[in-house]
Image (cartoon, helix red, strand yellow):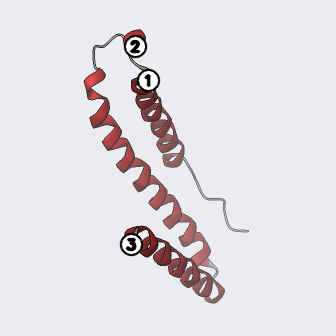
Amino acid sequence: MEDFNENKNYQANLQNSWEELSEIDPNLERQKEIEQIKNQTTSIYKKLVKEKKNCLKYINVDYSTLSLNDKEQLGALVNNTKSLSMLLGKTLEESK
């Protein structure tokens, strides 16, 4: 629970810092967007690596013989792969 609260406080402080700095430099908003995309990408990638390791046992297994839990694990792998793919293709809107 401590880790969660520390992470929550860290994220709140980081958000406040970004808001204060973006008032000084408008380009910081763009940097903030880049940082958010980078953090999301890293988070999903780490999940994907763990899920891949967990799903290696399904290689050469008939999908129809898998349990519901096994199918859900494979579905999560597919969904996170799609999410990562979308983030990798994400671009920032041009400044006006």
Q: Residue at x 54, y 71 (%)?
A: 31
58 vs 17, nearest the viewer: 58
x 39%, y 25%: residue = 70
Q: Which mark is residue 17?
A: none
Judged from this view, the residue extending furthest toward the right is: 96
Q: Which residue is mark 1?
A: 71
Q: Earlier in the sequence, mark 2 or mark 1?
A: 2
Whether 96 is drawn above or below 93: the answer is below
Q: Are marks 3 and 1 in contact (CB under 8 Å)?
A: no
**C-alpha distance separating marks 3 and 2:** 40 Å
Amino acid type, callout 2:
Tyr
Q: Residues within 10 Å of mark 2 (few under 14, many from 20)?
A: few
Q: Nearer the viewer, residue 26 or 40?
A: 40
Asked whether disc 2 touches disc 1, contact meaning CB atoms under 8 Å apart, the reply is yes
Image coordinates for residue 28, horizontal then vertical, percent: 57, 78
Nearer the observer, 47 or 37: 47
Disc 3 marks which residue?
2
Identified at 73% across, 68% down, the residue is: 96
Q: Quadrant of residue 50?
A: top left
Q: Residue 46 in the image: x percent, y percent?
A: 35, 50
Residue at 38 percent of width and 16 percent of height: 66
Label 2, on which residue?
Answer: 63
Above or below 85: residue 72: above
CA gap, disc 2 and disc 1: 8 Å
Tell me residue 27's x, y (percent).
60, 77
Query: Which element carries disc 1, helix, strand or loop?
Result: helix
Label 1 crowd (10 A; few <14 / some 14-19 / many >=20): some
Q: Amino acid at mark 1?
A: Lys
